[in-house]
Image (cartoon, grey):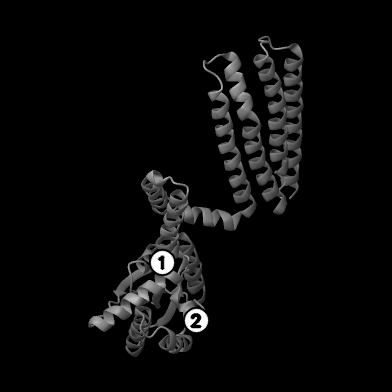
């Protein structure tokens, strides 16, 4: 049975030493270790690489069928790391064709790769490398400086340890300048709470992935959210002008919200339309119909609300005719285009 000795570097420190992964084979592994000895000599990753290589040599001397492999994820961390690492595992399996694997890693973060590998390969051994150090005062300072540098230079850490305090200081300064020091503590709690929510639920990773997959959708989503906020604010300000709730006041509030709300919906459909257009998706007409339907609904509703605002509580027949006619046209168009889409799919 062929065994792959796999060293895992999920945060891709190998790239800092100019090592491209996956590294497959004894010759390439030796070259990688040589590079790492110059750039990662004080890093536990280097020790793990050497440990994995030594395991490989020991098993090879015993006459076992083994291969040495170094794989890495991404410096971005999170799901992105696991996805990159997953692709490298697939490549290793394709090239090496191992029956089983022995894993070598050095940090709890690297351990996240184990299920990814386990889903593809039988794991017969796991070796975690723990580097023992004599931590005198000087060594402690060096180690502390190393981790501080990591917090500053690596994006996945700096976002949390620099970005959040930066926002807190910035917001606090603005509030202090504006003479609103009473709101500093609530603002700090709000920022911290928001950061915890974003990091805790992986919202930042999801947004980053979404941005990479569809930049257009992210932009329109931001515009849509802004429009939605404006709708709420405008509706609230309009509501303040009325003392009592009535049909007139309700219609005025809805009328104040409606343009922003409609824009918010339309721009989302438009973003989807652009995304489909970029990949030449035949279903682009779905979004076009949704945009047309939204515009028609806006004009019909706004006219009805204007009548209610003016004290006309009877819906005129022209609106009913327009609604029925537009609905009929949209339904016929939908089924017509649906048949065209199905025929094209079948022809392909």
Asked if residue 46 is positioned above or below residue 277 in the image, the reply reads below
Residue at 71% x, 23% y: name it. Answer: 300
Residue at 63% x, 37% y: name it. Answer: 265
Query: Which quadrant of the figure contains the N terminus?
Result: bottom left
Circles 1 and 2: CB atoms closer than 8 Å: no
- Label 2: which secondary element: loop
Point out residue 343 in the picture as x, y percentages from the top left corner.
75, 42
Instruction: Decide which of tag 1 and tag 2 comes sooner along the chain.
Output: 2
Q: Nearer the viewer, residue 342 or 175?
A: 175
Q: Nearer the viewer, residue 200 or 73?
A: 200
Point out residue 263 in the picture as x, y percentages from the top left corner.
66, 36
Q: Which residue is mark 2?
A: 19
Point out residue 251 in the picture as x, y percentages from the top left corner.
61, 19
Mark 1 packing: few (<14 Cα in 10 Å), some, or many (20+)? some
Horizontal relation, residue 150 to residue 134: left or right: right
Query: Is residue 169 visible from the viewing direction of this image?
Result: yes
Q: Which residue is mark 1?
A: 117
């Amino acid at each position: 049975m062929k065994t792959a000795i796999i060293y895992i570097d999920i945060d891709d420190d190998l790239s800092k030493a100019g090592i491209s992964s996956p590294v497959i084979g004894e010759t390439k592994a030796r070259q990688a270790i040589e590079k790492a000895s110059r750039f990662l000599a004080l890093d536990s990753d280097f020790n793990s690489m050497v440990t994995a290589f030594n395991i490989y040599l020991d098993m090879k001397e015993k006459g076992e069928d083994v291969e040495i492999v170094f794989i890495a994820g991404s410096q971005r961390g999170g799901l992105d790391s696991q996805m990159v690492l997953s692709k490298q595992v697939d490549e290793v399996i394709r090239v090496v064709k191992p029956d089983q694997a022995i894993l070598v890693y050095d940090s709890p973060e690297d351990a996240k790769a184990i299920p990814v590998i386990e889903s593809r390969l039988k794991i017969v051994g796991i070796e975690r490398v723990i580097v023992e150090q004599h931590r005198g005062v000087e060594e402690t300072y060096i180690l502390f400086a190393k981790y501080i540098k990591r917090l500053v230079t690596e994006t996945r850490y700096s976002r949390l340890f620099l970005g959040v305090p930066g926002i807190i200081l910035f917001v606090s300064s603005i509030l202090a300048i504006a003479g609103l020091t009473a709101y500093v503590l609530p603002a700090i709690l709000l920022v911290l709470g928001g950061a915890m929510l974003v990091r805790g639920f992986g919202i930042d990773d999801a947004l980053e992935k979404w941005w990479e997959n569809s930049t257009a959708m992210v932009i329109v989503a931001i515009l849509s959210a802004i429009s939605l906020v404006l709708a709420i604010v405008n509706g609230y300000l309009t509501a303040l002008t009325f003392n009592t709730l009535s049909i007139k006041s309700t219609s005025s509030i809805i009328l104040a919200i409606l343009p922003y709300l409609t824009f918010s919906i339309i721009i989302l459909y438009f973003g989807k339309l652009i995304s489909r257009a970029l990949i030449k998706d035949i279903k682009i007409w779905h979004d076009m119909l949704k945009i047309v339907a939204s515009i028609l609904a806006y004009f019909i509703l706004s006219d009805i609300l204007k009548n209610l605002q003016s004290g006309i509580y009877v819906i005129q027949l022209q609106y009913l005719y327009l609604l029925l006619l537009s609905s009929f046209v949209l339904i016929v168009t939908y089924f017509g285009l649906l048949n065209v889409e199905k025929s094209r799919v079948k022809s392909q």
